[in-house]
């Protein structure tokens, strides 16, 4: 007997774009706005933290975070995110997407505020408190990845599903941009109110006591967008695919989607129970059947996300170091503490405005025309090309007349990361796995990405140090230099192209076709003969 599509799921697949699609994008997307803000705003204030807590009186240069502290501050939220992706991804398949969705938001709100209130009796004590709260902040952020992607995927129609999921993820770009704007506004206000000389002119006076408020305000601001969306998240109904295919409650699925779609949908209790008994709809994650049907798919989604995030997070978290290396940001001694925050924020905001945000929305526009596979392969290819174009003639780009060219090339790597694998690695895992394992598999794929991000965040700190021991940052051993670090990132991008071959194309297909839940016992796909729900 051929497996048939449930009427409630077919109604979602053929639905025209409606208001509920946009509200879902905003509700899920504001979570990602907050996620990106919280993860990336730390890179705007690490130089300031070094000045405040680690400057030694009489030192020729302002203080910087010691290597182990810098690695912890930059990477601890990523460690929390990895753990949260695995835990909440699994929980989303066990308890339902909606029940878990509010928990992640509460964690993010509490820990954003607590991060800005980090105190200690010593510098290391304050940093330890900050790291503690940023780990749990990351844990909440981690849950948002699989849940937001799965909810949007299961609400969307099959014609524009890629566009909707990509739009949720594209809010990350606005989050990065918002972090830059908030830092610019806060640092400008403090600089206007508390004038200070440069470090070279007067080391002690270059750090006004009020500068300690700057990083706290920037970190705490992340709680605001999360708090604004909490009520709406709690009002969302559970997705019909979870209710029908996992919880096996056909009546509730039909009732919920009848309200959402404004049409009558047939309740198919017998069909739901019959589908649940089929072997293809009962295998577990660690079964041979899963390995046979989806093993290569999971390898493809995990490996590409892992490789992408090594490069993407290395670039994002350490833009300030690269800009300093090419002298786009002046030496620390020629600025006061507040001015340094302003200049770093301005540089990162320009990159986000000119390349990061446009790249996300190019994916939204073209993903359902060009397809996921093409965009991912194209993105990895151009990331490889531009990374090598920066790295091989690296000395050329450090010369003053060529710095604008460097920024253009560097921006293009961000553009093709976001009009490429940074978006598609998020979209595809939410489409190709069975409903009962969808959130878990997306969480595993995302966690592999964060493992890559951790390698990038911790590794790049050390690798990018000068080969000359006299030119390294305080406390760091010699590295391979920025040039060869960029070459390594280029090679990683190239390997990402190879693993993209394992990722299937999901354009234009229903979730059940892609996962095999709409197949007969021989694995053949068949659209329901009785799925008579008209387009709405």
Image: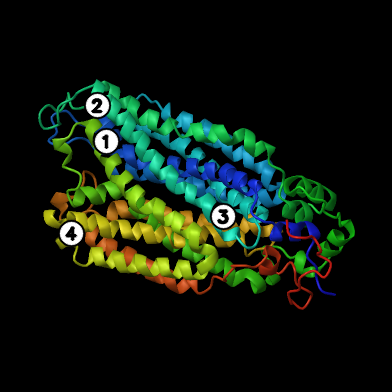
Q: Which mark is residue 191?
A: 2
Give the mark nearer the N terminus: 1 vs 3.
3
Of residues 122 and 374, the one nearer the viewer is 374
Estimate the x, y position of residue 301 in percent, counting from the top left: 53, 64
Label tally: 4
Rounded to the nearest angstrom, the CA distance separating label 3 from label 4 is 37 Å
Mark 2 and mark 4 in contact? Answer it, CB < 8 Å. no
Q: Which residue is mark 3?
A: 165
* Dot 1 crowding, Cα within 10 Å, few <14, some 14–19, many 20+: many
Q: Which mark is residue 342?
A: 1
User: Please, what secondary structure does the residue beneath circle 4 have?
Assistant: helix
Quadrant occupied by the C terminus: bottom right
* Dot 4 crowding, Cα within 10 Å, few <14, some 14–19, many 20+: many
**Could you tell me if residue 24 is visible in this image?**
yes
Give the mark nearer the N terminus: 1 vs 4.
1
Rounded to the nearest angstrom, the CA distance separating label 1 from label 3 is 34 Å
Mark 1 vs mark 3: give the one in front: 3
Give the mark nearer the N terminus: 3 vs 4.
3
* Residue plotted at (59% across, 57% down): 442
Mark 3 vs mark 4: give the one in front: 3
Rounded to the nearest angstrom, the CA distance separating label 2 from label 3 is 40 Å
Q: Which residue is mark 4?
A: 397
Give the mark nearer the N terminus: 2 vs 4.
2
Mark 2 and mark 1 in contact? Answer it, CB < 8 Å. yes
- Which quadrant would residue 209 be assigned to in this image? top left
Q: Is residue 360 above or below residue 99?
A: below
């Amino acid at each position: 007997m051929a497996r048939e599509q449930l009427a409630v799921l077919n109604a979602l697949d053929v639905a025209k774009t409606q208001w509920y699609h946009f509200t879902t994008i905003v509700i899920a997307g504001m979570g990602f706005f907050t996620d990106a803000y919280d993860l990336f705003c730390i890179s705007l204030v690490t130089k300031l933290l070094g000045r405040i807590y680690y400057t030694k009186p009489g030192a020729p240069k302002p203080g910087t975070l010691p290597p182990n502290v810098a690695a912890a501050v930059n990477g601890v939220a990523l460690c929390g995110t990895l753990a949260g992706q695995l835990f909440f991804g699994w929980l989303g398949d066990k308890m339902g997407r909606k029940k878990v969705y509010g928990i992640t938001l509460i964690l993010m709100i509490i820990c954003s505020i607590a991060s800005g209130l980090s105190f200690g009796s010593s510098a290391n004590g304050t940093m330890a408190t900050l790291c503690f709260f940023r780990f749990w902040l990351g844990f909440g952020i981690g849950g948002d990845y699989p849940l937001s992607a799965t909810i949007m995927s299961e609400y969307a129609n099959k014609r524009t599903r890629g566009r909707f999921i990509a739009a949720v993820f594209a809010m990350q770009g606005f989050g990065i941009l918002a972090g830059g704007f908030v830092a610019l506004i806060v640092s400008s206000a403090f600089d206007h109110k508390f004038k200070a000389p440069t470090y070279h002119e007067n080391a002690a006076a270059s750090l006004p006591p009020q500068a300690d408020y700057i990083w706290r305000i920037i970190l705490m601001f992340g709680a605001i967008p999360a708090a604004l969306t909490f009520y709406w998240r709690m009002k969302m109904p559970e997705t019909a695919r979870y209710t029908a295919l996992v919880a096996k409650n056909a009546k509730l699925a039909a009732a919920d989607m009848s309200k959402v779609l404004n049409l009558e949908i047939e309740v198919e209790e017998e069909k739901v129970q019959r589908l649940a008994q089929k072997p293809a709809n009962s295998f577990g994650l660690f079964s041979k059947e899963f390995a046979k049907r989806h093993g290569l798919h999971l390898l493809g989604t995990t490996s590409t996300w892992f490789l992408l995030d090594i490069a993407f997070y290395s670039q994002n978290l350490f833009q300030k170091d690269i800009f300093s290396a090419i002298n786009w940001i002046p030496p620390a001694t020629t600025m006061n503490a507040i001015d340094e925050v302003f200049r770093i924020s301005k540089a990162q905001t320009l990159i986000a405005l000119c390349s990061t945000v446009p790249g996300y929305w190019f994916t939204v526009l073209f993903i359902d025309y060009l397809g996921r596979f093409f965009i991912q392969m194209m993105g990895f290819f151009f990331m490889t090309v531009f990374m090598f174009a920066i790295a091989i003639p690296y000395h050329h780009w450090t010369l003053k007349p060529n710095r604008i060219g460097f920024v253009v090339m560097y921006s293009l790597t961000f553009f093709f990361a976001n009009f490429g694998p940074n978006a598609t690695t998020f979209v595809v895992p939410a489409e190709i796995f069975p409903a009962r394992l969808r959130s878990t598999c997306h969480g595993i794929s995302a966690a592999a990405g964060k493992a890559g991000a951790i390698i990038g965040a911790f590794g790049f700190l050390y690798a990018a140090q000068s080969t000359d021991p006299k030119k390294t940052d305080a406390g760091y051993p010699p590295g391979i230099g920025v040039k060869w670090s960029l070459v390594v990132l280029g090679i990683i991008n190239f390997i990402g192209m190879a693993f993209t071959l394992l990722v299937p194309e999901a354009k234009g297909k229903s979730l059940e076709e892609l996962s095999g839940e709409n197949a007969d016992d021989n694995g053949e796909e068949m659209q329901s003969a009785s799925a008579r729900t008209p387009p709405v």
